[in-house]
Amino acid sequence: MTELEKLQNRFGITGLARFEEGMGGLPRIALTTPAADATVYLHGAHVAHYKPAGQRGVLFMSAASQYRTGRPIRGGVPICFPWFAARAGDPDAPMHGFVRLGDWSVESIQRSGEGASVVLGFKSNSATKMSFNADFELRYHILVGPKLDLTLEVRNTGEREFSFEAALHTYFAVADSRNITIDGLQNTEYVAKSEGMQRKTQTDPLIRIDREVDRVYQNTQATCRLEDPGFGRTITVEKENSNTTVVWNPWIDKAANMADFGDEEWTGMVCIETANSAENAVHLPAGQAHRMRAVIQSTPH
């Protein structure tokens, strides 16, 4: 019996959850519910597709993504942990941490109203301790329904406190990134990574994409609204226990220099990331848990 067959026999639910071979041969869960459809790869616990009933897909996936062991999937919702972006003092460490590169275990799948609930897990091991010397358990709660409800739970299973950064690095599909607006972050300070790490304040009520944008907004718990007139919808991102919001679009030059991203794909996406990073890193005492949550809703105009 193959590993996929074992997973299907143990966790599959007829008409709701099916284990299948995804891109690059990577195993994934296909969820089909009255409220929405979704696809979740066990590699990186990666939500690669979410489509509410009667609507178009909400998440952007790059056609150039590399679906293989040791590489991140480009698009959807990558999980960044235990650091965000490059690790300070360790240039050889993988960008955004190691959990998006690893295989997660399935803990449960069940019906939830007109949707489905999936819980995936990842535990520290000898390999993770080589770059992050801490004992931890992660649980990722994925609730697929009229909203996409994502909760990353980090539990300190060791005997000493550790600090970590984390992000749900969500890529949203848009008709044209040059015509969208994002609100909710006015008067918030941010680090402009694409402008020499300058610290600025968002004075305009709306964020527009008219150049490379890579902004780490600090000390904000605000809900963001993405207005997309081309696709005729508003995407709302609510969050809990997240004090950082990242807004990112690579624009022309950076997109052309990314091996796993199409040269012209920057027009079809924008990232609004639910995070805790830099000065908002989490300090987690032994035996305690932290739960960061993002709730995503697409509302047609």
Image: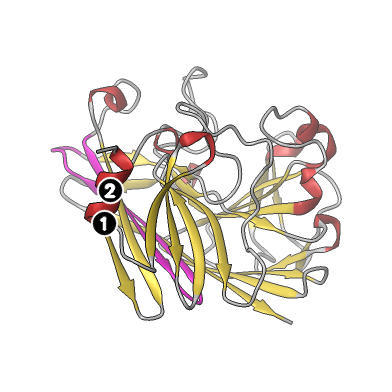
Q: Quadrant of the N terminus?
A: top left
- Asked if marks 1 and 2 touch (Cβ < 8 Å), the reply is yes
Mark 2: which secondary structure? helix
Relative to 211, does residue 50 appear above or below in the rendering?
A: below
| Numbered mark located on residue 11 in the image | 1
Q: Quadrant of the C terminus?
A: bottom right
Q: Which residues are magenta?
A: 135-160
| Coordinates of residue 39 in the picture (x, y in percent) | 49, 55
Position of 101 compared to 48: left or right? left
| Coordinates of residue 170 in the picture (x, y in percent) | 57, 53
Q: Quadrant of residue 220?
A: bottom right
| Coordinates of residue 215 in the picture (x, y in percent) | 67, 47
| Numbered mark located on residue 7 in the image | 2
The disc labelled 1 sits on which kind of residue?
Phe
The structure residue drawn at horizontal position 47% and vertical position 78%, both measured from the top left corner, is 34
The structure residue drawn at horizontal position 72% and vertical position 74%, both measured from the top left corner, is 233
Residue 21 visible in image? yes
Position of 152 compared to 134: left or right? right
Q: 197 or 17: which is nearer to us?
A: 17
